[in-house]
Image (cartoon, rainbow, N blue to C red):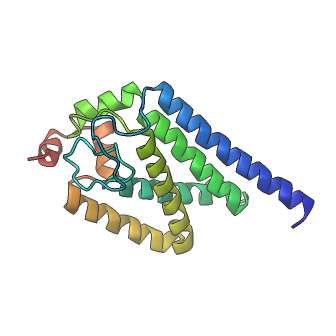
């Protein structure tokens, strides 16, 4: 490894650490706790989307929507930033997801989720859940890179379909409900 490549690697590691640190600090400033304060336990996975533990533990069914974020980032970066090295493309995906996690946990977005979607009791993510979402987006980015554009489009559509059938929600439905809420869809998504 040359001195120049060692410097580039150290810069990438420092930039990654800075993004992670800033994300955690900004989430804490927004009032996000590190762990679920009402759950009474730590869990790697919570499968019940109607539970108050959703978005509080490391992973939940909505983690799959963050995998799809990674697909979207791959397509966007492949289109607009193809000259970046793969390592810097990965860092850009990390940065974009970190920005989303901070924005998603603002009072504005939390209130929007509460009023416009079936997530009536949503209080925002824990820092732990945001880190899990970030990891899922990065896994999605790497998976999409491995699959290529055509195959990743197919996988994206399949994951959307599975989420709609499984939890009555998906990345597309979340975006739709935040931008142009549909009352019938909100009723269909409600926990029984």
Quadrant (top left/top right/bottom left/bottom right) for the N terminus:
bottom right
Q: Residue lying at the far front in this picture: please name it.
A: 40
Q: Which residue is drawn at 34% across and 43% down?
A: 56
- Front residue of 68 and 63: 63
Q: Is residue 89 left or right of residue 49?
A: right
The location of residue 179, given as percent across then percent down, is 33, 37
Q: Residue at x 53, y 30 (%)?
A: 26
Q: In this view, does 159 lie to the left or right of 99?
A: left
Q: In this view, does 57 lie above or below 107?
A: below
Splitting the image into 4 quarters, where does residue 88 fall?
bottom right
The location of residue 100, given as percent across then percent down, is 48, 41
- Front residue of 184 and 12: 12
Q: Residue at x 53, y 57 (%)?
A: 138
Q: Which residue is drawn at 51% across and 68% down?
A: 143
Splitting the image into 4 quarters, where does residue 184 fall?
top left
Q: Residue lying at the far right in this picture: please name it.
A: 3
The location of residue 115, given as percent across then percent down, is 23, 30
């Amino acid at each position: 490894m040359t001195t120049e490549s060692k410097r580039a690697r150290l810069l990438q590691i420092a930039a990654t650490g800075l993004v992670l640190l800033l994300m955690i600090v900004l989430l804490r400033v927004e009032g996000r706790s590190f762990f679920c304060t009402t759950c009474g336990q730590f869990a790697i996975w919570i499968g019940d989307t109607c539970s108050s533990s959703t978005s509080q533990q490391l992973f939940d069914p909505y983690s799959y929507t963050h995998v799809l974020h990674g697909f979207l980032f791959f397509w966007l970066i492949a289109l607009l930033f193809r000259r970046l090295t793969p390592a810097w493309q990965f860092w850009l995906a990390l940065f974009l997801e970190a920005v989303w996690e901070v924005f998603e946990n603002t009072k504005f977005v939390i209130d929007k989720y509460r009023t416009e979607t079936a997530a009536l009791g949503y209080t925002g993510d824990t820092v732990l859940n945001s880190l899990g979402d970030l990891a899922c987006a990065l896994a999605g980015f790497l998976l999409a890179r491995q699959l290529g554009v055509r195959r990743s489009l197919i996988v994206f559509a399949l994951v959307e379909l599975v989420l709609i059938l499984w939890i009555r929600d998906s990345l597309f439905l979340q975006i739709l409900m935040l931008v142009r809420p549909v009352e019938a869809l909100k009723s269909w998504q409600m926990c029984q």
